[in-house]
Amino acid sequence: MANNLDLGAQGSILVGSTSIVNGAVTGLSNTTWTGTNVQADRAATEGQLQQVSQAQIETNNTAVKYATSEQNGNTVVDYQNIVLAAPEAIVSKDATTNKISTTGGTTISNLASAGDYTNVDNATKAVNAGDLNNAVLDVVDKGLTFTANSGTAHKATLGTSISIKGAEDNSAFSTESDQGKNIYTQVETDGTIRIGLANNLDLGAQGSILVGSTSIVMVRLQV
């Protein structure tokens, strides 16, 4: 028998359940791929290749990918930016409140804390929602501290209000006050805001000065 058999275009060879017909090998038993029991010199089947291909497609759909861009008709991989495969995030900004809303995108969970945000060694670490919450609370809690010539210093956290007022009964600001005409303010080099009273008071035609039981009205001195 010849060393090289020529059976013609319609010829075939059958070995057990495996046949070779017109360049195609069929009947192989290894039709599934498990990743175990691998034999390096055994032929793979289309069924195994299909399983591997499908697994690769599924992995690609859920994989973390580097961002790509088109340059001169070529796809270029940007190894400085990562895109998470998910429905594209849609971002909108409220024109009134300036709040930014995001829908879609990918949620990352089980993210470790970046640690102390004031530590320069942590500057390039990703933060989780807990880190962000703690940093915001830290800033809010510091707030502003108000002091005066007397009284205890008052710390107002961000988002709270303070009151600056005169006597409780002094409510008719627009009709019974000089509306600040005789009051001066100045910011000093140490940040102190100094309040001063004018040397020459201008109380208007209806104004008066009361010292004890003595009243000065217009140009008349009444006792």
Image: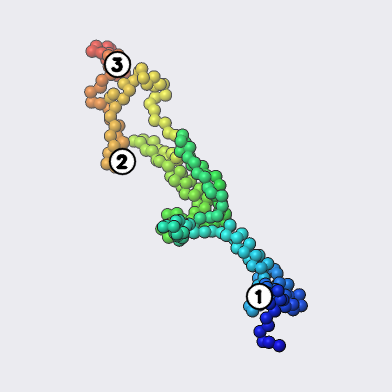
For image coordinates 39% across by 28% down, the residue present is 165
Task: Please state which of the two labelled residues, at mark 2 or mark 1, is closer to the viewer.
Answer: 1
Write down the residue under mark 1.
Answer: 43
Q: Residues within 10 Å of mark 2 (few under 14, many from 20)?
A: few
For image coordinates 29% across by 16% down, the residue present is 207
Distance between mark 3 and mark 2 Cα atoms: 34 Å
Position of the N terminus, as image quadrant, is bottom right
Residue type at the position of mark 1: Ala
Secondary structure found at label 1: loop
Secondary structure found at label 2: loop
For residue 162, the mark is none
For residue 207, the mark is 3
Secondary structure found at label 3: loop
Task: Please state which of the two labelled residues, at mark 3 or mark 2, is closer to the viewer.
Answer: 2
Evaluate if marks 3 and 2 touch, with contact meaning CB atoms under 8 Å apart.
no
Q: Nearer the viewer, residue 144 or 22?
A: 22
Left of 205 or right of it: where is 92? right
Q: Nearer the viewer, residue 111 or 205?
A: 111
Residue type at the position of mark 2: Gly
Q: Nearer the viewer, residue 181 or 86?
A: 86
Figure quadrant of residue 74: bottom left
Task: Please state which of the two labelled residues, at mark 3 or mark 1, is closer to the viewer.
Answer: 1
Figure quadrant of residue 50: bottom right
Q: Residues within 10 Å of mark 3 (few under 14, many from 20)?
A: some
